[in-house]
Image (cartoon, helix red, strand yellow):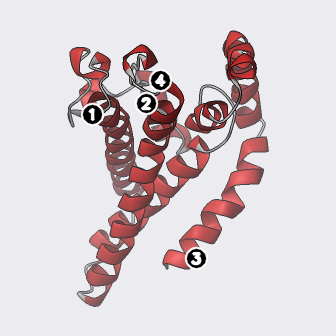
Amino acid sequence: MNNITSTIISVLAFLIAIVCHEYAHGYSAYKLGDPTAKNAGRLTFNPLAHIDPIGLVFMIMFRFGWAKGVPINPRYFKDRKRDTLIVSFSGIFTNFIIALLSSILFKISYRLNIYYLQLFFYTLSYVNIMLGVFNLVPIPPLDGSKIVMSLMPAKYEYKIMQYERYFSIILFILVATGMVSRIIVPIINGIMNILY
């Protein structure tokens, strides 16, 4: 298989993963009373609404990227901590469900001996697991940090939020130096082994 085909499959899988991830955040927030994502035009499956240009370039070049975060306003929630927890986990949960469904479709395409479908569904599984596991890392601005903070007393939560921009820099350094990969890649591979 040539690099162009591999890149097309990877980018398509990435777009599906991030669009569904971000849509899940926006939709769950909307159902919990927050119209911010809807008003911002983010309750859509149109990739153009969710793509971060730099994140897409990184995905093409390094097989690792990101999307624009969906805007959420917790002031609309009836129970701020509970609803923030639900919204934060919804994207991760969606990625794991897509990965599971993709593994089933992979097995069907394997029995039908359709090579490119096998490759696509395998890649789709991997990308979704990667995105789901990566977002579980409890460092702002990732979903994992919001999940952890939702379980904290408010005084500690607000203290962490004050330094969120510095944590973002730390996260970028950890990703760039490969520290995050050393932690999450064995987890990703373990989940892939279970599915396949």
Q: Look at the picture and state if 170 lies above or below 60.
A: above
Q: Quadrant of the N terminus?
A: bottom left
Upstream in sequence: badge 3 or badge 4: 4
- Give the amino acid at mark 1: Lys
Mark 1 to mark 2 CA distance (whole Å): 22 Å
Residue 54 numbered mark, or none: 4
Marks 1 & 2, CB-CB < 8 Å contact: no
Upstream in sequence: badge 1 or badge 2: 1
Residue 193 numbered mark, or none: 3
Mark 2 to mark 4 CA distance (whole Å): 9 Å
The residue wearing badge 2 is: 67
Mark 2 to mark 3 CA distance (whole Å): 27 Å
Q: Look at the picture and state if 107 lies above or below 161.
A: below
Please state if 48 lies on the left or on the right of 153 as rendered: left
- Give the amino acid at mark 3: Asn
Density class for disc 3 (Cα within 10 Å; few <14, some 14-19, many ≥20) is few
Please state if 125 lies on the left or on the right of 63 as rendered: left
Front one among 122 and 28: 28
Residue 130 numbered mark, or none: none
The residue wearing badge 1 is: 31
Upstream in sequence: badge 3 or badge 1: 1
Upstream in sequence: badge 1 or badge 4: 1
Q: Secondary structure at mark 1?
A: helix
Front one among 136 and 170: 136
Upstream in sequence: badge 2 or badge 4: 4
